[in-house]
Image: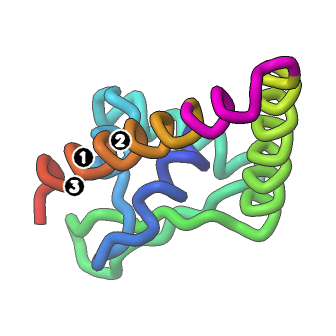
């Protein structure tokens, strides 16, 4: 979940903070911090201090985290293809179009509620 959150937030104009990840995941800051710490222990993300006392730390995905995320997305695609294998092509296209619209709507909502 942490990898997906950092990935989703990676297009922001600023570093991804613990609070950003907490909002993305719908958890409190301490819960997100614990999740990030575990993900960091696994070598999937790095957390770096912003360099100033009291400044938020920045979380980035490591090469191992990028590879795990890539593999997870391949698996998700394979499962989706398997679940829709007996669907007519038109239904698959419609489903894909609607899912894209849903994801874009969620991203727009998230962007509009994220602090600048």
Mark 2 or 1, nearer chain start: 2
The disc label shown at residue 26, or none: none
Report the Cα–Cα distance between label 3 and label 2: 10 Å
Q: How many marks?
A: 3
Q: Residue at x 23, y 72 (%)?
A: 53
Report the Cα–Cα distance between label 2 and label 1: 8 Å
Work out whether 99 lies above or below 52: above
**Residue 36 horizontal side relative to residue 63, left or right:** left
Q: Residue at x 31, y 40 (%)?
A: 106
- Classified by dominant secondary structure, the portion drawn in magenta counts as helix
Q: Residue at x 12, y 57 (%)?
A: 115
**Residue 87 horizontal side relative to residue 24, left or right:** right
**Residue 98 horizontal side relative to residue 87, left or right:** left
Mark 3 or 2, nearer chain start: 2
- Callout 2: 10 Å neighbours few (<14), some, many (20+)? some
Whole-percent x, y for residue 86 in the image: 86, 18
Whole-percent x, y for residue 9 in the image: 41, 59
The disc label shown at residue 110, or none: 1
Question: Is 91 included in the stretch rendered in magenta?
Answer: yes
Residue position for label 3: 111
Residue position for label 2: 24
- Callout 3: 10 Å neighbours few (<14), some, many (20+)? few
Q: Which residues are magenta?
A: 86-94
Looking at the image, which is closer to me, 93 or 5?
93
Q: How is the image coloured?
A: rainbow
Q: Are marks 3 and 1 in contact (CB under 8 Å)?
A: yes
Q: Are marks 2 and 1 in contact (CB under 8 Å)?
A: yes
Element on which disc 1 rests: helix
């Amino acid at each position: 979940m942490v990898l997906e959150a950092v990935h989703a937030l990676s297009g922001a104009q600023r570093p991804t903070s613990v609070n950003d990840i907490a909002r993305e995941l719908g958890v409190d800051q301490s819960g997100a911090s614990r999740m990030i710490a575990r993900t960091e222990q696994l070598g999937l993300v790095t957390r770096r201090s912003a360099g100033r006392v009291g400044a938020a730390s920045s979380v980035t995905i490591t090469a191992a985290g990028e590879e795990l995320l890539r593999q997870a997305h391949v698996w998700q695609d394979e499962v989706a293809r398997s679940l829709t294998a007996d669907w007519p092509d038109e239904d698959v296209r419609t489903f894909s179009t609607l899912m894209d619209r849903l994801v874009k709507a969620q991203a727009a909502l998230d962007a509009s509620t994220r602090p600048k």
